[in-house]
């Protein structure tokens, strides 16, 4: 098929789109053809149905991190189907049900079709109280839309200063958009994942090892996991949410003889595959890890050589103030990374650098120059001794023998590891678990060996696109960064500056995903202008004053960083953007031109991509266009083979510079975290309002969505029709709730009405509604209305699982035998309330 053949008119694309999307989603090809407005179109559609396809190489890129290369089959300018692509690194062929349904994402009635302006908004009279689900919009021309946005940016800077601009982006896409380049040039404030979303586990782990950023820590690449002898998946349903990436490698390890332990309060797809399932009570994860440590200490299963050479376990700690003994008190010229240890052969202290083994005591107490000291490992063993398996079994709802088995497998079978999820950190003090499991793996010596595992979706460092200084242009004004945990105060209280203009893209967080959703919506009323670019009319775009329709991924040319597999991917444009949608790059370029930065954005995006290809010796246009991917380094990588990034170059088993955590349910002077200590807020059995709200509430990831993406795909909604509350039959019958009845889930912050679903796989005392449903999908309320937006001092991360509720039967007006809420329409061309055509 020629390039000309791909440039079908929008009218033709929409009609053939109806055949593809509606015909395959229930209406049938015949009924669609009967609705065609002339017989010639019907005949053309039949011919098209029988024609030949052009295969277009592209890639998926939502926040599942799969970055799966895909083949898109195009016929007569219309996408007909999607399949997995065999990438250059062939063993990483991947894809999932969601990726195969992009057909219904491209041709979907919920697509934003034209630039729109809220009818009740004007620069002089913004009327923010008119934003929301009932907001009305009118179609405007692209030039008018971009003029308005640029004028509002300039006005805000002029009247309130450059820090009155707030740039917001989520994780909805991974292509080259020019967004970062433009905001650096214009200036203002930006929000960022760095603190606020899913950073607890990584923060705790990386504080111990000195490695990585704030999300999941570095780990061996997935193709090395086959060498693992024991894998503990902790708080993650990988076989539902990461199955196209991590699950296949875990199954390979099992086939090779590995033991699989799953720690999860719910009997999940992943738990079903386990050799041992530990159905832990929510919030008791640090208790369990300490119990495993106690078993390892009790049975001398710790790795002595590793502890001596690669951790500060033998470091001497002053008993009077808990600090490490100063190397300068032992030798006049200590090494920069030296620690003081006690040499059992010489009977005296000495200073040793990182990666040094020797006859160093791991346990003991001595008096040196009048100062009583003990080893760091002595302090850890003392802490673990308070958590024997039998006691923790009662606390965590487990069998002591199962705790011991898990610990024994990890410590004695050979190399292995622990693979947590973000979910295990979605508690107020979830960072402590990161510290704890990092320390547990230090006891077993599970760093720097083949078969070690420390996290899910590992990074292939060579699979990052080399963009040079593209995102940091000369003459940039620069932006100040605020973690998501601070943005609510920024918007609501003007702390430290009142923002007046927001540009958002690739995100449905503020209107749908953040805790205490109503507070975010109220806080946005302080903004004079909200501009949002998206593919769909989401709960967040309904809070906007100006909406810009973004192109679907298949409608753009792009290069992708993949990082979870050793390929770099190229997106070939399957057809031009439908209606008046635009590639985000061209939106940014249009704004740049109006803001005096047009020379920094080439007119043709391909020129930008060409710059990256020419500057990267691994890439060539011939290879990218022919295969869609270029393989990077396929060699399995073992992490943590060099000195650790801590001050001592060793894992910090004992931290004398530990942060002090403060917050609810903690002592007034806080808790210092030299060694791991279980800290709980609402999951604690003695939480102040536990009797009033006895059920713990979770919001698991769904296999039918990536966060809130795919929430409006008809094929998937046929399977996953509406939100429901997973509840154990015992909890339901105790409250007089029948299976399938609508219930009100509520606490002191808010409520949501959903249908009850009996589930024997969820333990009594725990309920769950999958996250990602849009506001319109709930009969009443919203699940994020239940969640507190508070964050702890150290973790600074939203605690989506740290929530208690009560559940009662919903009012009669909400009871129905048929779900009457939003029923997503296919791509029949039916107009949404966002259209003004």
Image (cartoon, helix red, strand yellow):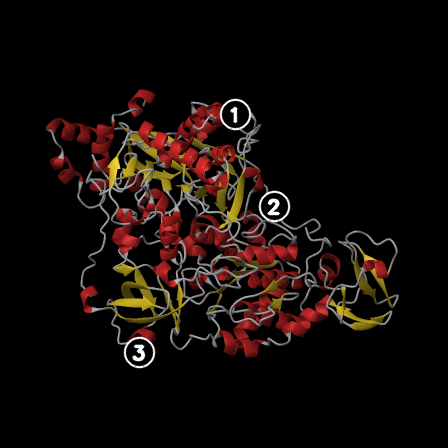
Q: Distance between the residues labelled 3 and 2?
A: 52 Å
* Residue tagged 3: 734
Mark nearer the N terminus (3 vs 2): 2
Q: In this view, does 86 lie above or below 196?
A: above
Residue at 77 percent of width and 53 percent of height: 337
Q: In this view, does 399 lie to the left or right of 293?
A: left
Give the tally of numbered discs: 3
Q: How crowded is mark 2: few (under 14 residues within 10 Å), some or many (20 or more)?
A: many
Asked whether residue 333 appears in the rendered view, the answer is yes
- The numbered disc on residue 53 is none
Mark nearer the N terminus (3 vs 1): 1
Residue 488, percent from left and from top: 45, 53
Residue at 29 percent of width and 31 percent of height: 580
**Is label 1 in contact with label 2 (beta carbons under 8 Å)?**
no
Q: Is residue 220 above or below residue 759?
A: above
Q: Is residue 564 left or right of residue 353?
A: left
* Residue tagged 2: 637
- In this view, the residue in front, 523 or 218, is 523
Mark nearer the N terminus (1 vs 2): 1
Residue 13, percent from left and from top: 24, 30
Q: Distance between the residues labelled 3 and 1?
A: 65 Å
Q: How crowded is mark 1: few (under 14 residues within 10 Å), some or many (20 or more)?
A: some
Residue 271, percent from left and from top: 44, 63
- The numbered disc on residue 611 is 1
In the structure shown, which secondary structural element does the residue marked by tag 1 occupy? helix
Residue 640, percent from left and from top: 65, 51
- In this view, the residue in front, 514 or 610, is 514
């Amino acid at each position: 098929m020629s390039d000309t053949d791909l440039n079908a008119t929008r009218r033709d694309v929409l009609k053939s789109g109806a055949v593809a999307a509606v015909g395959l989603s229930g209406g049938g090809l015949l009924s669609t053809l009967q609705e065609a407005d002339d017989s010639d179109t019907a005949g053309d559609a039949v011919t098209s149905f029988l024609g030949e396809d052009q295969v277009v190489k592209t890639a998926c890129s939502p926040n599942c991190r799969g970055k799966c290369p895909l083949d898109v089959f195009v016929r007569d300018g219309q996408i007909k189907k999607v399949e997995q692509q065999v990438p250059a690194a062939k063993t990483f062929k991947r894809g999932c049900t969601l990726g195969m349904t992009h057909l219904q994402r491209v041709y979907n009635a919920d697509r934003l079709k034209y630039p729109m302006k809220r009818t009740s908004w004007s620069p002089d009279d913004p009327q923010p109280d008119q934003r929301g689900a009932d907001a009305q919009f009118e179609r405007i021309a692209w030039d008018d839309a971009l003029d308005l946005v640029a004028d509002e940016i300039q006005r805000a800077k002029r009247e309130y200063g450059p820090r009155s601009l707030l740039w917001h982006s989520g994780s909805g896409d991974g292509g080259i958009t020019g967004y970062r380049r433009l905001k650096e040039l214009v200036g203002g404030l930006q929000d960022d994942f760095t603190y606020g979303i899913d950073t607890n586990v990584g923060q705790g782990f990386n504080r111990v090892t000195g490695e990585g950023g704030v999300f999941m820590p570095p780990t061996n690449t997935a193709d090395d996991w086959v060498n693992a002898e024991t894998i503990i998946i902790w708080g993650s349903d990988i076989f539902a949410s990461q199955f196209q990436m991590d699950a296949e490698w875990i199954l390979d390890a099992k086939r090779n003889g590995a033991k699989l332990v799953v720690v999860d309060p719910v009997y999940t797809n992943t738990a079903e595959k386990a050799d041992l399932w530990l159905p832990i009570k929510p919030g008791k994860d640090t208790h369990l890890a300490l119990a495993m440590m106690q078993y390892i200490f009790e049975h001398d299963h710790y790795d002595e050589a590793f502890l001596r050479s690669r951790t500060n376990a033998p470091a001497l700690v002053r008993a009077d103030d808990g600090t490490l003994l100063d190397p300068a008190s032992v030798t006049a010229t200590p090494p920069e990374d030296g620690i003081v240890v006690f040499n059992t052969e010489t009977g005296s202290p000495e200073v040793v650098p990182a990666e040094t083994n020797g006859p160093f005591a791991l346990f003991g107490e001595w008096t040196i120059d009048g100062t009583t000291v003990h080893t760091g490992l002595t302090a850890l063993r003392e802490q673990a001794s308070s958590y024997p398996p039998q006691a923790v079994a009662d606390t965590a709802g487990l069998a002591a023998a199962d705790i011991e088995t898990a610990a024994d497998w990890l410590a004695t079978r050979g190399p292995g590891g622990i693979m947590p999820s973000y979910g295990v950190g979605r508690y107020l003090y979830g960072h402590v678990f990161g510290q704890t499991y990092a320390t547990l793996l230090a006891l077993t010596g599970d760093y720097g060996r083949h078969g070690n595992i420390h996290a899910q979706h590992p990074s292939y460092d060579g699979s990052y696109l080399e963009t040079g200084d593209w995102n940091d242009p000369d003459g940039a004004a620069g932006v100040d960064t605020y973690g998501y945990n601070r943005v609510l105060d920024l918007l609501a209280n003007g702390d430290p500056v009142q923002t007046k203009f927001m540009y958002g893209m690739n995100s449905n967080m503020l209107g749908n995903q953040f805790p205490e959703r109503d507070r975010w919506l109220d806080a946005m009323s302080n903004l004079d202008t909200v501009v949002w670019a998206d593919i769909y009319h989401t709960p967040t775009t309904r809070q906007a004053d100006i909406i810009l329709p973004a192109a679907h991924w298949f409608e753009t040319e792009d290069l992708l960083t993949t990082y979870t597999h050793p390929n770099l991917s190229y997106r070939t444009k399957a057809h031009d953007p439908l209606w008046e949608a635009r590639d985000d790059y061209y939106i940014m370029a249009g704004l740049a031109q109006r803001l005096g930065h047009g020379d920094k954005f080439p007119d043709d995006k391909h020129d930008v991509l060409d710059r990256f290809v020419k500057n990267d010796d691994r890439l060539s246009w011939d290879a990218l266009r022919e295969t869609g991917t270029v393989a990077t380094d396929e060699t399995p990588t073992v992490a943590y083979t060099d000195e650790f990034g801590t001050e001592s170059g060793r894992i910090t088993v004992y931290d004398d510079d530990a942060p002090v955590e403060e917050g609810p349910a903690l002592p007034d002077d806080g808790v210092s975290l030299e060694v791991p200590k279980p800290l709980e807020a609402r999951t604690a059995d003695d939480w102040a309002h536990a009797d009033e709200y006895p059920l713990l509430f979770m919001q698991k990831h769904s296999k039918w969505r990536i966060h809130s993406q795919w929430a409006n795909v008809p094929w998937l909604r046929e399977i996953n029709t509406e939100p429901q509350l997973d509840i154990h039959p015992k909890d339901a019958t105790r409250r007089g709730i029948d299976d399938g009845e609508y219930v009100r889930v509520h606490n002191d912050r808010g409520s949501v009405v959903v249908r009850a679903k009996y589930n024997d796989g969820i333990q009594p005392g725990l309920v769950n509604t999958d996250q990602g449903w849009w506001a319109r999908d709930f009969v009443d309320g919203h699940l994020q209305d239940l969640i507190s937006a508070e964050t702890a001092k150290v973790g600074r991360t939203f605690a989506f699982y740290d929530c208690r509720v009560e559940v009662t039967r919903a009012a009669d007006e909400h009871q129905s035998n048929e779900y009457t809420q939003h029923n997503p329409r296919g791509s029949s061309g039916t107009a949404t309330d966002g259209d003004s055509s």
